[in-house]
Image: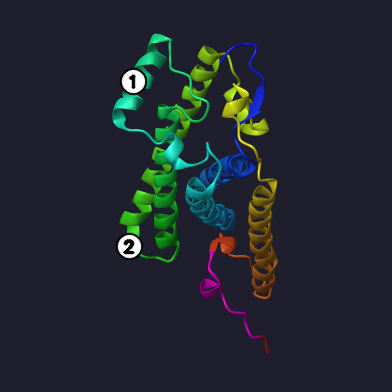
């Protein structure tokens, strides 16, 4: 990379949409984890994470050049070499994900999948307290990885003199024209965003029905929005 290199498209629209939707879903789910009142929101965002991870796995095979796992997943030696360069202040430059960032992405996908699976089991009352504790531990582990990833992005941005967070918004980085991708695939990104929005809408639409049922009992039980339909109280028959 040189100061005279033009801006080229590196991150396609689906990768960027996935990234920021995953950020919103994880942060929202983490903040609502301890609240019974917001349990429906927590569950909705958890399911959203599962869908996003499934999409990313597919796009990691079928996506554009820098979205494919084959372009950025590297072995432990490459990660160690990059981290040593980062600590020394002379990290190697990569157009796509660097080895440390690639490791963070793989960990986030694995931890995210574990969170969704354990959360589903807890919600369906499978596994007892053990899975509940596992769900919490994995969630905290993912938060740690996110924090380390953010520090790494900040350090790499400073050392390479490029704004990596901005690149994940715009999709553009400074590099040689031959290293860019040809298409942003906005249609796929739009389909992903619309699918998430539709799922959130359907979940939101289910909440007023729960409230209406609770009102027939003249009481709103604490945490009602977090119960499954089978767990809801039945209307009281009045004479």
Q: Residue furthest front?
A: 178
Residue 188 lies, in percent from the top left, at 65, 51
Residue extent of the magenta highlight: 227-237
Q: Nearer the viewer, residue 223 or 12?
A: 12
Q: Which residue is mark 2?
A: 127
Label drawn at residue 42? none
Main secondary-structure element of the magenta-colored stretch: loop
The quadrant of the rendering that contains the N terminus is top right
- Mark 1 Cα shell of 10 Å, populated few (<14), some (14-19), many (≥20): some
Q: Residue furthest bottom?
A: 239
Give yes or no for residue 228 being in the magenta stretch: yes
For marks 1 and 2, the one nearer the N-term is: 1
The quadrant of the rendering that contains the C terminus is bottom right
Q: Nearer the viewer, residue 129 or 90?
A: 90
- The residue at the point 47 percent across, 50 percent down is 57
- The residue at the point 64 percent across, 37 percent down is 182
Location of residue 13 (image quadrant): top right
Label drawn at residue 81? 1
Residue 44 lies, in percent from the top left, at 57, 56
Q: Is residue 146 left or right of residue 180?
A: left
Q: Nearer the viewer, residue 73 or 116?
A: 73
Q: Look at the numbered disc 2 and give the secondary structure of its residue.
A: loop
């Amino acid at each position: 990379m040189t100061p005279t290199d033009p801006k080229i498209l590196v991150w396609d629209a689906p990768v960027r949409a996935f990234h920021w939707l995953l950020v919103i879903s994880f942060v929202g789910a983490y903040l609502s984890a301890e609240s019974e009142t917001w349990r429906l929101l927590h569950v909705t965002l958890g399911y959203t994470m599962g869908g996003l991870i499934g999409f990313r796995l597919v796009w990691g095979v079928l996506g554009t050049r820098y979205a494919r796992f084959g372009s950025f997943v590297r072995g432990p030696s490459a990660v160690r070499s990059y981290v040593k360069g980062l600590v020394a202040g002379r990290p190697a430059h990569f157009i796509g994900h660097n080895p440390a960032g690639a490791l963070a992405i793989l960990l986030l996908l694995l931890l995210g999948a574990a969170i969704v699976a354990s959360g589903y089991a807890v919600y369906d009352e499978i596994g007892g307290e053990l899975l509940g504790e596992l769900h919490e531990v994995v969630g905290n582990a993912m938060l740690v990885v996110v924090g380390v990833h953010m520090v790494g992005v900040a350090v790499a941005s400073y050392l390479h003199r490029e704004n990596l967070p901005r690149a994940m918004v715009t999709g553009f980085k400074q590099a040689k024209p031959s290293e860019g991708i040809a298409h942003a695939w906005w249609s796929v990104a739009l389909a992903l965003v619309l699918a998430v929005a539709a799922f959130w809408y359907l979940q939101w639409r289910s909440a007023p029905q729960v409230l209406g049922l609770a009102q027939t009992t003249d009481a709103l039980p604490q945490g009602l929005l977090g119960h499954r339909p089978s767990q809801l109280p039945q209307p009281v028959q009045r004479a």
